[in-house]
Amino acid sequence: MGKPLAEAKSEIVHAAAYLQWYAEEARIYGETISAPSNDRRMLVIKHPIGVVGAITPWNFPASMVARKISPALAAGCSVVLN
C-alpha cells in the first residue's frame, strides 16, 4: 500500500502552497487596511474567534489538511484535527 513518490511530492508542494498563501494574506492585512476616504482609518485587531474542528478525508491528507487549517492558523485560532 502507499502512494507513488511523484504523487506524494506533488501533494506536499500543494500543501505548502496553501500554507504560504494564507501566511501572506495574514501579513498583508497586518496592522491597517486602506480606508475608503482620507479622514478615516481602519484597524485590524487580531483576536482568534475560537477553536476550529477540521475533519478531512483520508485519501488526500496533506493537501486537504493544509487547506482547512491554514486560514485558521493565520487568524490565530487553535485547531483540532481528525
Image (cartoon, helix red, strand yellow):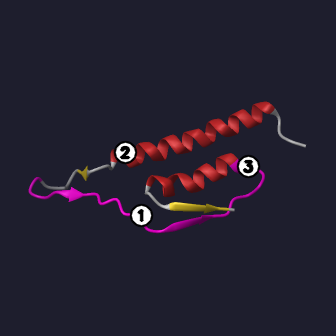
Regarding mark 3 in the picture, which secondary structure is present there? loop
Residue 61 rendering spot, x and y as whole percentages: 71, 50
Is 35 colored magenta in this rendering? no
The residue identified by callout 1 is: 48
Q: Quadrant of residue 14?
A: top right
Residue 59 rendering spot, x and y as whole percentages: 78, 51
Q: Residue at x 45, y 52 (%)?
A: 74
The Cα atoms of the two marked residues, 3 and 2, are separated by 28 Å
| Left or right of 56, for residue 72 | left
Residue 42 rendering spot, x and y as whole percentages: 21, 58
Quadrant the C terminus occupies: bottom right
Farthest residue toward the bottom?
50
The image's mark for residue 60 is: 3
Q: Residues within 10 Å of mark 3 (few under 14, many from 20)?
A: few
Is 55 colored magenta in this rendering? yes
Tell me: residue 27, above or below residue 13.
below
Which label lies toward us, 1 or 3? Answer: 1
The image's mark for residue 27 is: 2
Farthest residue toward the left?
39
Regarding mark 1 in the picture, which secondary structure is present there? loop
Q: Quadrant of residue 1?
A: top right
Three-letter code, disc 1:
Pro
Q: Which residues are magenta?
A: 38-61
